[in-house]
Amino acid sequence: MALTPDDVVHKEFQHVRFKDGFDPEEVDDYLDEIVVEWRKTIEENNDLKAKLAAFESGQHTAPVAAAPAAEAPATSTASATGTSAGIIELAQRLHDEHVAEGEAKRRQLIADAEAEVARIRSAAEAKQREEAVRLERERNTLEGRITELREFERDYRGKLRAMIEGQLRDLDQKTSSDSTPVSAIGL
């Protein structure tokens, strides 16, 4: 089945997940340009076919710009064949030019897309490196804070233990020096 301009206009692409694609409006605008040029080419092709058919059937009253020999009435089969060959050659040349132009545009689009992919990848890698550096700094800061808190806890426990042991010693000394006989209390 031949691809028509309407096929291009109505083509729908699937959305990709987890990454950005091309700008849909830019793609649509470009496809619109392609369709306009394609329709012009089809119209030119149809005109040339009609002129060729008219010429071959002997109705060469319509002027053919690409073949000056067509302006004068053809008097022999050889000149008609030569003019037909000229028209066919012109049509082939136009076709080849349009195909070459399309190929050049395709190559340019692919090159542009590859350059954009490289730019996006480079930007993503740079952002990833920046984020890794930031996270490493944050990790180092947190590890330093954890070390400080552990030292504080160790010191605090040591001071608390020393205070409690001191209080226990004081309590032991007080109870041994204040030991009053039970009989003195009046029991």
Image: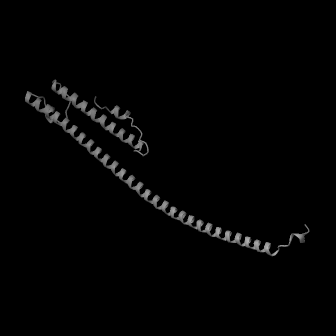
Tell whether 77 sits left or right of 119.
Answer: left
Identify which residue is drawn at 31% across, 38% down.
Answer: 37
Q: Is residue 106 visible?
A: yes
Identify which residue is drawn at 73% across, 70% down.
Answer: 168
Tell me the colour scheme of the image.
one colour
Identify which residue is drawn at 19% across, 29% down.
Answer: 52
Identify which residue is drawn at 36% across, 42% down.
Answer: 30
Tell whether 16 sits left or right of 39.
Answer: right
Q: Residue 27 lies in what quarter of the image? A: top left
Q: Residue 146 lies in what quarter of the image? A: bottom right
Q: Position of residue 170 (x, y in %)?
A: 75, 73
Q: Is residue 65 visible?
A: no
61 vs 180, nearest the viewer: 180
Q: Which residue, as the protein is rendered here, is positioned at the far bottom?
A: 177
92 vs 125, nearest the viewer: 125
Q: Quadrant of the C terminus?
A: bottom right
105 vs 63, nearest the viewer: 105
Q: Residue 185 lies in what quarter of the image? A: bottom right
Q: Is residue 173 above or below residue 78?
A: below
Count all numbered tags in the image, as a single digit: 0
Q: Quadrant of the N terminus?
A: top left
Q: Which residue, as the protein is rendered here, is positioned at the far top?
A: 57
Q: Is residue 107 above or below residue 78?
A: below
Q: Position of residue 176 (x, y in %)?
A: 79, 74
Tell whether 39 sits left or right of 165.
Answer: left
129 vs 117, nearest the viewer: 129
Q: Which residue, as the protein is rendered here, is positioned at the far front?
A: 183
